[in-house]
Image: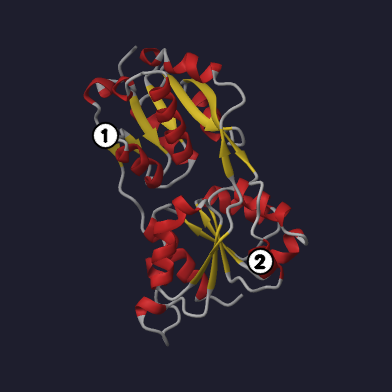
Amino acid sequence: MSSTSGMVSTRRRILTSCNGSWSSCMNARHDLPAEKHLIGRTVLLTRAPPDNEDLRRALESLGAAVLALPTIAIAAPTDWAPVDRALVNLATYDWVVFASRHAVRAVCERLDALHISPALLPALAAVGSSTALELRRLGLSVDCVPSVATGAALVEALAAAGVRGKRILAPRGDQSGRELRDGLGRAGAVVEEVVVYRNVRPDVMDSEIVSRLEEGQVDVVVLGSLSALKNLIEILPSGKRALAGVRLACVGPTTAASARARGFSNVWVSEEPSLQGLVDTVVASCGAET
């Protein structure tokens, strides 16, 4: 495997500082104590409960009533063979680029199934702090995290590090976009994508929560991806109409742009997909007129 100015061998970090997102908007609803900005608000989370726990507690501590309606289930790819070929040849890659926590978990679980040590992974890059945190939680160091949680920002950071001629492995979901592949390709990298998980719609839905959405009893829906929004629209009997008066709090500008492209205007974005960034975004949205 080629080196990137000694970057891979020394595991040098190329970290940029995170931008603040919505803390300046936290002065909304002055009539309430700071810790209770969300009293009387109902917030719907669309991730699976294990991924919601910290956010749920944080929102409830601010007075919100929190509902959970997972709109995405994570399934294994239809074929592990391309993934396995890539993982047994990790030494041929200069970087592995992760765009989601699901990709991190899928790769690490597959490495374990193949009895391959994660220590053999080359330099690691992550789109956003939550993905980087998942890598660190698993004991892995992260070499590149952009200050803005988008594929374009990661491409820019890696291009600045020098990836021309480098081989990059990009594990992804089956519905992920091509922003990373195309951008890194333009920067001169050789990119190999492998599908390590599939986004599917859950088989079972909570009909009571669906009814509350249909009846306008939800103030904010938190969305982590375009897939979450697409599945939610398909789940609702009246589709997009049920979300007409709902604030959409999106993780990252890509999801927000996709929501706006589908005709939604009350869209709020957490530029940094951290817990505090999401909480601040929900609070800011509830301090605005609809």
Distance from the alpha carbon under mark 1 to that under mark 2:
47 Å
Image point (34%, 43%), residue name: 133
Q: Residue at x 61, y 75 (%)?
A: 290
Residue found at the far left of this picture: 10
In the image, what residue type sits under mark 2?
Glu
**Disc number at residue 232?**
none
SS at badge 1: loop
Mark 2, residue position: 208
What residue is disc 1 on?
13
Q: In this view, does 9 lie above or below 148?
A: above
Q: Up-down: is 162 above or below 284?
A: above
**Is 100 situated above or below 266?**
above
The spot of residue 210 in percent (x, y) is 67, 63
Single out the mark in the foreground, 1 or 2.
2
Residue lying furthest right in this view? 238
Q: Residue 141 at what x, y percent from top left?
A: 28, 33
Residue drawn at the location 42% of the way across and 20% of the way down: 164
Q: Residue 191, percent across and down?
A: 50, 21
